[in-house]
Image (cartoon, rainbow, N blue to C red):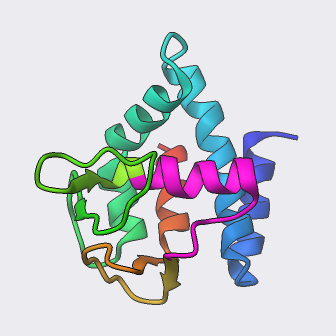
Amino acid sequence: MSVQSFLDSAKILYDNQKYNEALCLVCIVIDSCAAQEYPNEKNANRYKKFLKKHFRTICEYGFPGISADNIRIKVNITHNSLKPDQNGYVDMEQIIYHIIRCGLVHECNIDDTISFTDTTYIGDWDKKFYLPKDIILGLIASIKQ
């Protein structure tokens, strides 16, 4: 097995609308890449650093129509892993790591408040948080840099 075999499998799963499974494989690859890039950091720190460094690419491919170095979301739910700022906002890196990656890797499940959409929709997290399914393609693109 290799990084490329995981990415190839993720693309097949994505094409077959198995978004959670595709995303799980991509999250595992990012873990590996982040460990190589930041070997002296703890897992969560290096993962989020990797996402932050490559966020423009993630955004370009994963949030069609949006070009940004950072996206902050107002979180109107309680989640122990998220650390909102004083105004209730979190970076997308926190959401990807704590909610998406940890949920998939440790529980084989994404929080039920997350919904994949066909279009780019960014809004506050109030009962539901919508992510474009293309975020998978954005994460894959970040790995290929």
Find residue 29 and report its image quarter: top right
Q: Residue at x 38, y 32 (%)?
A: 49
Percent position (x, y) of residue 74?
22, 65
Q: Is residue 144 above or below residue 34?
A: below
Q: Residue at x 28, y 64 (%)?
A: 75
Percent position (x, y) of residue 142?
47, 49
Residue 140 placement, left or right of 90:
right
Between 2 and 45, the one lying in front of the other is 45
Looking at this rendering, what residue extends furthest in the top direction? 40
Percent position (x, y) of residue 133?
52, 77
Q: Is residue 8 above or below residue 40?
A: below
Q: Main secondary structure of the magenta part?
A: helix
Percent position (x, y) of residue 111?
57, 67
- The magenta stretch is 95-113
Find residue 104 and report its image quarter: bottom right
Looking at this rendering, what residue extends furthest in the left direction? 87
Quadrant location of the N terminus in the rendered image? top right
Residue 133 placement, left or right of 17:
left
Q: Residue at x 11, y 54 (%)?
A: 87
The answer to whether residue 144 shows anywhere in this view is: no
Looking at this rendering, what residue extends furthest in the bottom direction? 118
100 part of magenta stretch: yes
Q: Residue at x 68, y 44 (%)?
A: 28
The answer to whether residue 23 shows anywhere in this view is: yes
Q: How many marks?
A: 0
72 part of magenta stretch: no
